[in-house]
Amino acid sequence: MSNDALKENTPFQPQVHIDLCHFSNELTLLSGWFTHQSQSPELELLTNLDGESLNQHWLSLNRQDVEEVLQLNDDTSCSGFIWIGDTTGLDPSCLHIMVEGSGFPFSGFSPQSVIEMETVISVLGDVKEQFISTAEELSIIKSKESTELVGELSTDSRQVEHFFDHCFITDSNLVHFKGWLLHAQPESVFLIDKEGRKLDCTSSFMTYYRADIFNKLQMKGSDLEAGFIGVYRLEADFVPVEVSIHFADATRIKSNISNGEGKITKLEALKDLLNAVDVHASHFFNTGYPVVLELVNEIWQGGESLDGLEAEIKTYGTVTPDPKVSLVIPIYGRYDFIQHQILKFCRDPDFSNHEIIYVLDDPKIEREFNIACHGVYETYKHAFKTVYAGENLGFAGANNLGVSVASGQYILALNSDVLPSNQGWLTRLVTKFNTLDDAGILGTKLVYEDNTIQHLGMSFEHDAYYPGVWMNHHPNKGIPEPLVFADKTTAVEAVTGACMLMKKDFFIKLKGFDTRYVLGDFEDSDLCLKCHQHQHKIYLDSEEKLFHLERLSQNLVDSGDWKFKLTILNGLYQMQKWGNKISEVKRIHE
Amino acid sequence: MNKVLIVAHGHPELNKGGGEQAAYNLFQECLAQGDDAYFLARTDAIPHGGAAFSCLGSEREILFHTTHDDEFLFSNIKTRHLWRDFSDLIKKINPDVIHFHHYFLLGIEMFQVVKQLMPETKITLTLHEYYGICANSGLMLKAKTDKLCYKSGTLACSQCLPTKSPGDLFLRKEYIMQQFDLIDQFISPSQFLKQRYVDWGLSAEKIAVLENGQPEVASLPLKTQGTKVRLTYIGQINRFKGLDVLLDALLLLDRNERADFQLDIHGANFSAQTSDFQKSIATKLKRLGSTVCMHGSYEPHELASILEDTDWVIVPSVWWENSPMVIQESLNYGRPLIVSDIGGMAEKVKHMHNGLQFRAGKASSLMQTLKLIVSEPELRDRCASNIEKPLTIKQAYSQIKSLI
């Protein structure tokens, strides 16, 4: 049988393909191609196979490319199409496409779904406006929608696809909002109050890559950072009700700010932010981190200043009226360390000369902390003070608060998981301190419970795991103590904040620990750098030995990716703050 | 007249245990010698009206309704029980000496409270097991495998106790050691236990090895051996006491060999054990049939009649033990023993002297020992004849007094 005979006997069966589709509430836009033998092919969408025709409009396009690939017979052609229809209230999967008298259920196609209508009609080029205009005349779309489609009218009524995951005020005064948007880099961000007053918070806003949106919307090839996050600490006299994000083309998106407290904690907000940060991105160490630092600071620094803090001070027993040293010991998580420390201190007669101050830095354990302190005092009858600001201040803030209520001539910043190994050590350290030239801070040897070195001074080192950051290196860490030879006293680059002796006046002159570091990473080395800046020296004593059960306190804050990022950010802040000073200190100690 | 306070972790009338009984015996001896003595025993019974104390029997026998708030440290500081209630009580008793028989469940800060309030008061502490050294119920057994543990260490112990880090174990030891610093005299009923504490870090000079002391009783004459060898198991029944090893040893004998034995079990607390353990023992008992008879718990005054018909007392514990009361009681009544060859048991019962030893936890070894006592029946009388009368309570108390 010849081909011609076959042609006569076999009815033509068109092929249909849909490349892209866009659905909004009322409109459906499709692009694709179909084959036909008619010179004036018809394309029509029905509500179902026997259903009504939709209010629709389509435009045919040349698809020579497809014709070549399909190797069509001479009597068969291929046309591209852009189709638009009013699909209000319809389920698109029920639609049927009619081509050359053949019906195709829409559910049989797998087009790529796109968010922006512009993506579908962009192929129309010069005839785009004409196509939209016709659709408008046919009442398929309203004039307002048409402007969005053609993308030329710059009014702020144009839509940007977006979603606010949340937008609220938490942690008393922290505006926190996040979500995604499909638009190039926003230009400015404002908080707006009831009277319409605007507060520019652009510097507290960043965009980032969101894998979920990227995958969902099949944004392959796009480098759009769809995610956004904003955090802003409010001043007392400004209560915003709306967040407004503005773009260079005068479009904007906005969200109401819901009121209410405690939606997420400061720590959760911090984790949330850090989860959005890609520290491995090539631009991060050059241009990316300052804005992240700014945001971290906004989240963490609610209580930066001690001014206005109403700290509750309790005194258990009669504290030495004129103490030589005030020990300042922050408590976070594990309050049972108090029991262990007080037992050690009360068995050391030297401690009648000193003052012990525990700073509760963890509101979650306030009740248990108070019960334990009472029991510890009643059992051991050794006096101590407690201070509580009613909030978590972090390592630096807690120490600064403790020092603010200290009466001693000296302060000893001490971790709660540090235990002395013998008696009289504190006065011996003070005595040594006074023999040293230009002493600013004196640290001492710390060992783990298995008598391996935990701390024997610190040095600033580079670390491949934390590129571009000076890390605080602990030389000799983990080495059995008897194997390590150290001078009785050595000038060092830095010492750990787990045990630091210094004059209280000098600590105050240095303005204490810098509270911009988050969760205890670099506050100690920062204080040491301040000390160097003031022409004082850091010394390490190796005649005394205290146990430091470092892992016990570290485990209180879960590790993980966000903590790693935080360490990098703290390190970057230290580098940003101190610049060449670190290299200078290193040169002096070489 | 001496003012004496004896403190125990339980009253033997409410808690059947060797330590509790030893403490109570000492209290009775103090009274007998004319001391102004009091007995303070911890209880978990509900007190009246939230009071910390109540009395049992007489006003000199005081129950202390408390428990520690930190089991890991044996610490009891959060409630007022030690620093207020116990403190008030000892102020009123004002003892010259306090004999502590435990700190478990009471609170290890008791020593601190005493020394703070009355530094001149002497404190003795009788060590009954390895609680200070071992946070796994003081057994010195590996937690996951129940294998014998020879030495504590922060890392090794943390592997036994996964929720505790080496640092936690370091803190625990430091804490307990500092409380032990306040003890004037430790008393260890066995050399083995003393050595474990010395290895741990206590000063050997501060620990005297001194048995708990037994009531003065006459040895029971050995009866003519009958057709069956009469074995007796006395004491608590739990998975560390090795009753299953004993039953397995009997099961390893063939039917004819087994017919040579009769085992009587006078054991306490069986019903408090896990259902798996109970089920396992019950299965073995069923297979052994009339060879074994379970009698339940016993009272101290029943001991003589229990031991009267006994040829051998068996102590098959799979943990170290200290100085098991049942060994002292058996020796007191002149009965030879078959014991596991470890710890306090091996120290008190010498092989082929006053008893026999077998390899701890090994049913086959015990089975061979059982065959031996059948094939060599004269062993019973020979071992019995070598038994030395243990220290009497009176002698023990005299020696304690001489120590302080």
Image: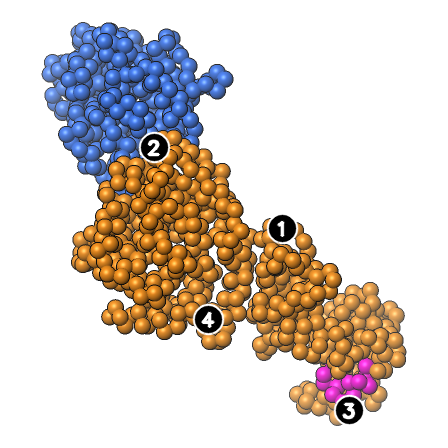
Chain colours: A orange, B blue
- Report the residue at 37% width, 9% height from top: B59
Q: Residues within 10 Å of mark 2 (few under 14, many from 20)?
A: many
Range of residues picked out in magenta:
A121-132
- Report the residue at 58% width, 62% height from top: A231
Instruction: Specify whether B241 is left or right of A273.
Output: left
Q: Is residue B39 visible?
A: no
Q: Are marks 1 and 2 in contact (CB under 8 Å)?
A: no
- Report the residue at 17% width, 24% height from top: B209
| Cα gap from disc 2 to disc 4, whole angstroms | 52 Å
Q: Are marks 2 and 4 on the same chain?
A: yes
Q: Amino acid at mark 3?
A: Asp
Residue at disc 1, secondary structure: loop
- A104 is higher (above) or lower (below) than A412: below
| Cα gap from disc 3 to disc 2, whole angstroms | 103 Å
Q: Are marks 1 and 4 in contact (CB under 8 Å)?
A: no
- B30 is higher (above) or lower (below) than A266: above
* Residue that carries the numbered disc 3 in the rendered image: A75
Q: Amino acid at mark 4?
A: His
In the image, is residue A325 part of the stretch drawn in magenta?
Answer: no
| Cα gap from disc 4 to disc 3, whole angstroms | 57 Å
Q: Are marks 4 and 3 on the same chain?
A: yes
Q: Residues within 10 Å of mark 3 (few under 14, many from 20)?
A: few
* Residue that carries the numbered disc 4 in the rendered image: A280
Q: Which mark is residue A261?
A: 1
| Cα gap from disc 1 to disc 2, whole angstroms | 41 Å
| Cα gap from disc 1 to disc 4, whole angstroms | 34 Å
- Sequence order check: which comes first, mark 1 or mark 2? 1
Label 4 resides on the chain identified as A
The image quarter containing residue B35 is top left
